[in-house]
């Protein structure tokens, strides 16, 4: 993946649905990551006794991007509006996510329940700030579509269901949803970096991201 002035270093930033301790790890990846950012609300993770990847040397950061969200509950009726709601009501927490990625001393995993909505916005923010082209950010977001059935099965396992959770528009990956996010950032006079600093981020955080993630 390209970025301004170079390439994004591999093995530093991951996104996923809620991880399981039993997950198979791809070859060549040290697991678990040093830093884990859990974007779920407390209502979503209430069934767990602790984070599935908690352990020595792992820092868990809970930064809910929709603090009142309960399992199966969505405050709007489409993903385009949901993504805009996250940006409007949780920009400060999105800044906190980026700061946590920038401060990580190793690899970082960002996840929510499904790994594409709150997580997709967060990853898109990081990639935008380090200068990854728009088409590559959209392509990364669309990777989730290849794993929809697996995600439905994973969600079912979390709640003790025998069958995958039903298909839903909210489990899809519409380009319009991530396009709306990128359009908003790009509409700022100085692009994504200007939007980020306007909502509370700093140039220092952006510099740290670029220094650590771009080769």
Image: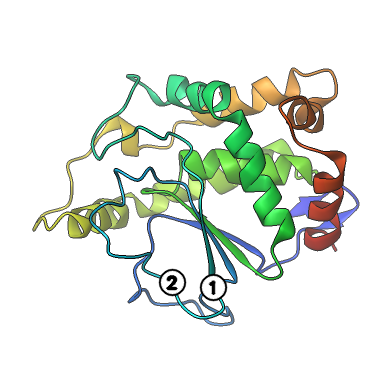
| Quadrant of the rendered image containing residue 153 | bottom left
The C terminus, quarter of image: bottom right
| Quadrant of the rendered image containing residue 13 | bottom right
Q: Which percent across, then down, holds residue 211?
A: 86, 58
The residue shown at (74%, 17%) is 187
Q: Which percent across, then down, holds residue 174?
A: 45, 31
| Quadrant of the rendered image containing residue 11 | bottom right
Residue 185 left/right relative to 138? right
* Cα–Cα span, label 2 and label 1: 6 Å
Q: Are marks 2 and 1 in contact (CB under 8 Å)?
A: yes
Residue 9 left/right relative to 181? right
For numbered disc 1, what is the local secondary structure?
loop
Q: Which percent across, then down, holds residue 157?
A: 19, 60
Inspect this view and state whether residue 136 appears.
no
Residue placed farthest to the left in the image? 162
Q: Which percent across, then down, holds residue 8?
A: 76, 59
Q: Which mark is residue 54?
A: 2
Compared to residue 213, the image places residue 114 above or below, namely: above
The residue shown at (57%, 80%) is 30
Q: Which mark is residue 30?
A: none
* Residue for badge 1: 58
Q: Please tell me which residue lies in front, 91 or 145.
A: 91
Residue 203 left/right relative to 165? right
Q: Please tell me which residue lies in front, 63 or 177.
A: 63
For numbered disc 2, what is the local secondary structure?
loop
């Amino acid at each position: 993946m390209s970025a301004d002035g170079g390439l994004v270093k591999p093995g530093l930033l991951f996104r996923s649905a809620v991880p399981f301790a039993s997950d198979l790890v791809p070859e060549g990846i040290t697991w678990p990551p040093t830093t884990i950012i859990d974007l779920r609300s407390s209502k979503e993770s209430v069934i767990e006794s602790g984070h599935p990847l908690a352990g020595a040397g792992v820092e868990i950061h809970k930064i809910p991007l929709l603090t009142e969200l309960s399992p199966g509950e969505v405050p709007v009726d489409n993903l385009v509006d949901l993504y805009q709601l996250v940006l409007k009501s949780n920009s400060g927490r999105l800044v906190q996510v980026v700061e946590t990625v920038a401060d990580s001393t190793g690899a970082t995993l960002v996840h929510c329940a499904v790994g594409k909505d709150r997580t997709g916005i967060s990853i898109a923010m990081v990639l935008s700030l380090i200068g990854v082209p728009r088409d590559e950010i959209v392509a990364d977001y669309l990777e989730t579509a290849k794993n929809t059935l697996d995600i439905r099965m994973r969600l079912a396992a979390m709640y003790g269901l025998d069958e995958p959770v039903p298909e839903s528009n909210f489990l899809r990956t519409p380009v319009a949803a991530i396009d709306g996010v990128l359009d908003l950032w790009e509409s700022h006079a100085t692009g994504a970096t200007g939007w980020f600093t306007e909502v509370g981020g700093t140039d220092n955080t952006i510099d740290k991201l670029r220094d650590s993630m771009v080769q």
